[in-house]
Image (cartoon, rainbow, N blue to C red):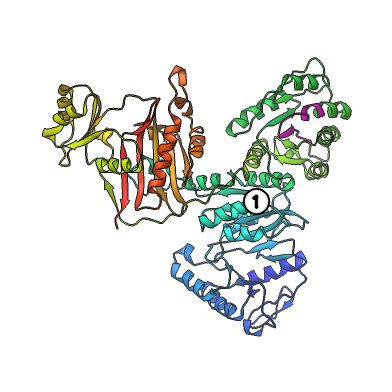
Amino acid sequence: MVGGAPAERVVAQCRKLGFEGPIWPVHPSRPDLAGVPCLASLDDLPDVPDAVFLGVNRHATVQAVRQLATMGAGGAVCYGSGFAESGEAALQQDLLEAAGELPLFGPNCYGFVNTFDRVALWPDEHGMVRHDRAAAIVSQSGNVAVNLTFQQRGLRLGHMVTVGNQASVGTEDVIDALLDDERVTAIGLFLEAVKDPQRFATVAARAVLQRVPLVALQTGRSAAGAAIATSHTGSMAGRAAAYDALFERTGVPQVHTPSELLETLKLVDRGGRMRGRRVVSLSCSGGEASLVADRSEATRLHFEPFAPEHVARIERTLTELVTVSNPFDYHTFMWGDRAAMSAAFTAVMDGPQDVTMLVLDAPPSPDNDPSSWYVAAEALADAADATGGRAVLVATMAECLNERFRDHVAGRGLVPLLGLGEALVALDAAAHVGAQVSPPHAPVTSPGATRLIDEASAKSRLRGLGVAVPDGGIALRDDVLATAEAIGYPVTLKALGLAHKSEAGAVKVGIEDAELVSAALWNMPATELGYLVESTVTDVVAEVLVAVRRDPPVGWLVTLGFGGVHTELWNDVVHLLAPVSEEQVIDALGRLRSARLLHGYRGRPAADVAALARLVVALTEGVVGTDVVEVELNPVLVGRRGATAVDALWIEEVS
């Protein structure tokens, strides 16, 4: 431990946790740190250290790292700030060059706590205790990490690792190392960005194979503006879209608050991923049942009705005054009667659901008598034992299950989840953990200078990729009528050289004759680039947006959504990372709010979704890895047979 006050706190935390190995404080003038005698300099170390905490200023950090690398130290935590996060990228590069092969946490890093091995290179308080098996958390924020260690939710937490600026060791490196530790049951992530998305996907796949759930809480998700301002896609994607696609592809569920992160980790730490999203809810109040139903609408959980024979089995354990439904209000006729409640709960759990939740808020005060609430919890545990089903206890308010109650039900094999909203998010996330392992996504580089390709040239390139576009050609103003006659009516007329033609009055669709062509031409803006005259697509069931764009550092982002002039208004889009398969495209289309428009909405014919999927795959395979920066097709007109791109925006990198 090198330095003054921060290093002294690290010494104290290691001793408090019970670390039994040698501790070597280093300070040029102090006699000791936290009662452990100091060495004057790194030159005085009696041996090569396995791990070093550097609690010194940024310039002294660089010097110390260079010396530690020379002596072959195991690794270092660089607590000091004032590097790249403060605009000093050159100094951070100096630090990396000084380190060579020496792995570093940070700089601008709080360090880590490893309760399994009683190590705390951690210059502050923490609330962690030792467990034989437990979850781990990796955080890019030191202060958030401190806060998370103070959790009072009953989460077993064995590792807390902060990575700071990730100059050397990144989040994905820590995940990989934690997966080597068989004591780690689940890994939570608090992050702003992934340092190496390709490596992240690799370690996420490893986590799936090892059945160690990963759960992510990403911050800084507000839209930062599009890199390519001319496209609809850029304005809708924002910073978060590519990360959403990365987490979806790698089977890493996302949560949005620290409490959701903790509850999800607690759920998967105690029982692993859920096999599906079928949930049965038990409560003794119609109000609670309604709350469950209402709050679950924001999730992908399924509260399926009981089958008739299942209803009959449940009814045999109840009075005739109770109606069986899901969520299930079992009333209070049996309250306090463990045998009766166990029988009813066992009948409920003897079904196909993936988890059964009992909503139960118990009186937490020492002045109250919670005994009858204990009976209800015991009855649920009895039912879980009898059926082998998975059961959780859910408090609508976190403060209504105190530590004693939580410990008791955990001893019976139940997971106590605190907060109804958090519990439903946790159940949903646990069902998404490791749902699939996809092939690695395509790497991406940031583009340099770019140029916009005119629509006619873009469509020519699309045709070469196997993407259907309308028949047509370019004509100067005096040749437009002849070109329209040659193509055959109805035709579509567009003035070239404008990115958003509808807003500029530069497009007219479905022109039926020469007189209307002349009128449309008269009302259009003049252009020296000429006009695109095309046959009008008449077989139209739905308009869809299809786009592929570079989204560094994550990957090539494939966007599908509600298409046409109102695309941005509805913002109904889903995102994937390339490469994509036809099956993945069809599944993603099904997640759109407008998905019903593709499947015969209100008596309309169904769209040729298979043709649309083939178009998306052909476009993606044709542009990924090339000099293309973005291609947006809006709209793609999907008919009863076929899908045709009638508008195209193509941006490429200038070599």
Residue 561 lies left or right of residue 315; in this view the side is: left
Up the image or down, 250 lies above or below 103; here it is: above
* Residue ID at (64%, 52%): 207
* Residue ID at (59%, 48%): 216
* Residue ID at (72%, 46%): 153
Q: What element carries label 1?
A: helix
Up the image or down, 474 lies above or below 293; here it is: below
Q: Position of residue 82 (x, y in %)?
A: 50, 67
Residue 474 lies left or right of residue 99; in this view the side is: left
- In the picture, residue 16 is in which quadrant? bottom right
Residue 411 lies left or right of residue 116; in this view the side is: right
- In the picture, residue 232 is in which quadrant? top left
Q: Which residue lies furthest to the left in this view?
A: 478
**What range is drawn magenta here?**
346-362
Q: Disc 1 designates what residue?
A: 209
Amino acid type of disc 1?
Leu
Q: Which residue lies furthest to the bottom in this view?
A: 44
Up the image or down, 504 lies above or below 107; here it is: above
Q: Is residue 531 visible?
A: no
In front here: 622 or 409? 622
